[in-house]
């Protein structure tokens, strides 16, 4: 299964967040990123069952730690 990869930002207290356009709110998750800025797969915090993230979850990437290869 292919999971969506979502860039997230640090909140300053050990959590990471991103704006969910389906729930119109921030979703927050914990955990340190690896050397490549990846936080890994997370179960969705979506409360909108119509969100495409609801059933599959997503992979989080720390936007501040990743670099564009272009």
Image (cartoon, grey):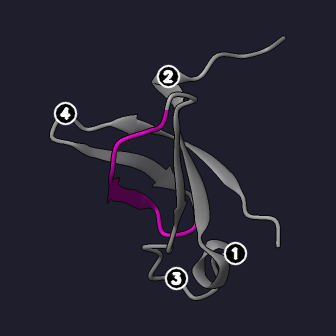
Residue sitting at x 57%, y 67%: 22
Q: Are marks 3 and 4 in contact (CB under 8 Å)?
A: no
Of the residues tagged 1 and 2, which is closer to the observer? 2
Of the 4 image quadrants, the one containing the N terminus is bottom right
> Quadrant of the rendered structure where residue 54 is?
bottom right
Residue sitting at x 38%, y 47%: 17
Residue at numbered disc 2:
65
Q: Residues within 10 Å of mark 3 (few under 14, many from 20)?
A: few
Q: Are marks 4 and 1 in contact (CB under 8 Å)?
A: no
Residue at numbered disc 4:
12
Q: Residues within 10 Å of mark 2 (few under 14, many from 20)?
A: few
Q: Residues within 10 Å of mark 1 (few under 14, many from 20)?
A: some
Of the residues tagged 3 and 4, which is closer to the observer? 4
Of the residues tagged 4 and 1, which is closer to the observer? 4
Residue 44 colored in magenta in the image: no
Q: The magenta stretch spans which residues?
A: 22-34
Q: Secondary structure at mark 4?
A: loop
Spatial CA distance of label 4 from label 2 is 14 Å
């Amino acid at each position: 299964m292919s999971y969506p990869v979502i860039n997230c930002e640090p909140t300053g207290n050990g959590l990471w967040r991103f704006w969910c356009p389906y729930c119109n709110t921030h979703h927050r998750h914990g955990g340190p990123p690896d050397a490549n800025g990846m936080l890994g797969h997370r179960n969705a915090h979506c409360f909108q069952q119509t969100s495409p993230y609801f059933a599959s979850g997503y992979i989080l990437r720390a936007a501040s730690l990743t670099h564009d290869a272009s």
